[in-house]
């Protein structure tokens, strides 16, 4: 069982330590730094707050900034405003489940406080499990336990740290996505598809994960062509591809249909408390009882694309303005990281990339020792996934979200830095190690595992290689700066 695995135990221990430190620092920063008066969604509190509520707010309110307020509002009141539908229901539903566990405390706490505690507690749990899921996935894909270990430890210091802790859906999405990828690597296609589908109900970019299922099915098709009936296998492939697209698209379609019933069909609107109606009037938010919005009359009434365009100005090259230059600078490190990873992999495996990962070599299919780790042929589909997300995010989204967008969606953000550390940091080979059981069944007997090599590098910062300083400097700077700014409504979204 995994608790006896020393590397997993160390990943879990480090994840817990980092999350506890995150919660302490956000409370500290929120207490000593005045909140910035941002033009953010801030609905009125309908229930009176007591002393315990004020205590919870003081300790955890740093986790309720920016988009977190939308998730908490949806969990408390439902989808009342049109722009609420930009946020998928998976995480608010998880918050409600967590709140049910706090029902015995409802005499002391308001629903808002219970939701805030639920958000902090669940994301604590989701983060820990996501770190372990990433470690396990790395062992399966990289065939290099050390790199998998390093990558999982780097995830604990993720540049997207504050979003993995705050009331955002990133931690849950990372857990579901990494777990689904791991299940697919184990050959459990149905379980993987189910997890990918649930992830799509948490964040819209889960739709892109259909590429993993399709690539896996194409690999199976080409490998069986020489042994089985080609026509039968082709029909089976087409059916599998259709089922994959249908399964992952179903949560998105159902959510859009629910929005249609609320805003486009008469008599579907729910009662709205007067203070929230007044907020809609003051801020210009559309509610279901008003005139039908224009998207109701589209041939394909997709509310999501309309909201992203009208409320968030999301669209192709819409964010390319001179005044957005600071946000482009914030996204530069993760952009360079993924672009560098892509270039390294493509130049190492040009034939593999030309054949879309379906044929490893012109001459043979044997795996060289140099192809372990990040350069493993199995990494190809993960790299394509990361590159697609980077391209779409860089051209069509608010670029400052790229850090959390990629940091919660693709393991490449952690695998490639782990590869660089192992390849270019001599200190890792001299750090004190402890004996352990083999990390995988294929590991040589008596292999040793660093207790926590990332902390070892931090302790020996002055003698680390430049690449190590750049990587850890980026991770730690964004880890800390995100807490400092985001928790006080400063521009870190």
Image: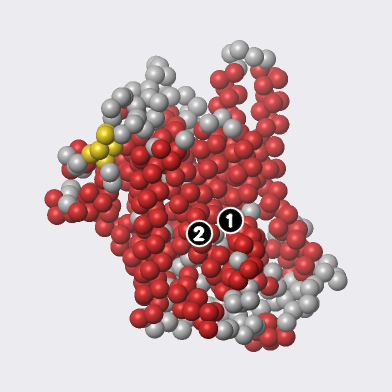
Residue 89 in the image: state x and y as whole percent: 65, 60
Q: Which residue corresponds to the image point at 74% horizontal and 69% vertical from the top-left?
A: 294
- Indicate the position of residue 210 as horizontal and vertical percent values: 59, 42
Mark 1 element type: loop
- Do callouts 2 and 1 mark residues in contact (Cβ within 8 Å)? no
Q: Which residue is mark 2?
A: 123
Give percent across and percent down for residue 180. Answer: 55, 41
Is residue 481 something that shows in the picture? yes
Which residue is pictured at 53% across the width and 46% down the height? 177
Query: Closer to the observer: label 2 or label 1?
Result: 2
Residue 231, given in percent of the width and then of the height, sits at: 70, 19
Left/right placement of residue 234 relative to residue 29 reads: right
Residue 194 sits in which quadrant? Answer: top right
Q: Nearer the viewer, residue 197 or 453?
A: 453
Gap between marks 2 and 1 measured at Cα? 15 Å
Q: Is residue 292 visible?
A: no
Q: Quadrant of residue 84?
A: bottom right
**Rendered position, 238 above or below 232:** below
Res. 203 mark: 1
Label drawn at residue 242: none
- Is residue 352 placed above or below 99 in the rendered structure? above
What residue appears at the point 37 percent right and 50 percent down from the top-left corner? 13
Residue at 30% from the left image edge and 24% from the top image edge: 445
Q: Is residue 344 left or right of residue 120?
A: left
User: Which residue, as the protein is rendered here, is positioned at the far top?
Assistant: 227
320 left or right of 307 in image: left
Query: Within 10 Å of the Cα at label 1, are there few (<14), some (14-19), or many (20+) other Cα atoms?
Result: many
């Amino acid at each position: 069982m995994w608790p006896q695995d020393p590397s997993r135990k160390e990943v879990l221990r480090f994840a817990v330590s980092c999350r506890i430190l995150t919660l302490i620092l956000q409370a500290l920063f929120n207490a000593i730094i005045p909140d910035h008066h941002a033009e953010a969604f801030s609905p009125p509190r309908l229930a009176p707050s007591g002393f315990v509520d004020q205590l919870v707010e003081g300790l955890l309110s740093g986790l309720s900034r920016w988009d977190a307020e939308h998730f908490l509002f949806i969990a408390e009141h439902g989808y009342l405003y049109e722009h609420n539908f930009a946020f998928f229901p998976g995480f608010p539903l998880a918050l409600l489940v967590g709140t049910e566990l706090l029902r015995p405390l409802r005499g002391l706490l308001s629903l808002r406080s219970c939701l805030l505690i639920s958000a902090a507690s669940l994301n604590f749990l989701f983060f820990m499990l996501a770190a372990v899921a990433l470690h396990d996935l790395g062992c399966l894909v990289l065939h290099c336990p050390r790199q998998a270990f390093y990558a999982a430890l780097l995830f604990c210091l993720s540049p997207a740290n504050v979003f993995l802790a705050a009331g955002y859906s990133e931690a849950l999405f990372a857990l579901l996505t990494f777990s689904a990828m791991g299940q697919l690597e184990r050959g459990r296609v149905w379980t993987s598809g189910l997890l990918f589908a649930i992830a799509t109900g948490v964040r819209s970019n889960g739709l892109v994960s259909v590429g993993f299922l399709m690539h896996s099915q194409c690999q199976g098709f080409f490998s069986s062509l020489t042994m089985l009936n080609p026509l039968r296998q082709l029909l089976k492939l087409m059916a599998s591809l259709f089922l994959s697209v249908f399964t992952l698209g179903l949560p998105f379609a159902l959510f859009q249909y629910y929005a249609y019933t609320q805003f486009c069909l008469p008599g579907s609107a729910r009662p709205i408390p007067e203070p929230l109606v007044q907020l809609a009037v003051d801020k210009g938010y559309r509610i279901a009882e008003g005139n039908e919005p224009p998207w109701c009359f589209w041939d394909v009434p997709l509310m999501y694309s309309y909201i992203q365009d009208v409320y968030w100005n999301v669209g192709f090259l819409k964010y390319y303005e001179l005044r957005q230059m600071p946000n482009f600078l914030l996204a530069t490190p993760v952009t360079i990281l993924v672009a560098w990873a892509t270039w390294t992999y493509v130049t190492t495996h040009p034939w593999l990339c030309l054949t879309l990962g379906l044929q490893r070599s012109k001459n043979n299919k044997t795996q060289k020792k140099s192809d372990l780790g990040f350069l493993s042929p199995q990494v190809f589909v993960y790299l394509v996934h990361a590159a697609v997300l980077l391209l779409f995010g860089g051209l069509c989204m608010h670029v400052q979200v790229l850090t959390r967008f990629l940091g919660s969606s693709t393991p490449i953000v952690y695998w490639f830095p782990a590869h660089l550390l192992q390849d270019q940091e001599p200190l890792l080979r001299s750090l004190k190690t402890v004996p352990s059981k083999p990390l995988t069944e294929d590991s040589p007997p008596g292999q040793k595992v660093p207790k926590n090599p990332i902390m070892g590098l931090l302790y020996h910062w002055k003698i680390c290689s430049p690449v190590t300083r750049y990587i850890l400097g980026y991770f730690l700077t964004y880890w800390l700066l995100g807490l400092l700014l985001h928790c006080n409504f400063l521009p870190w979204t």
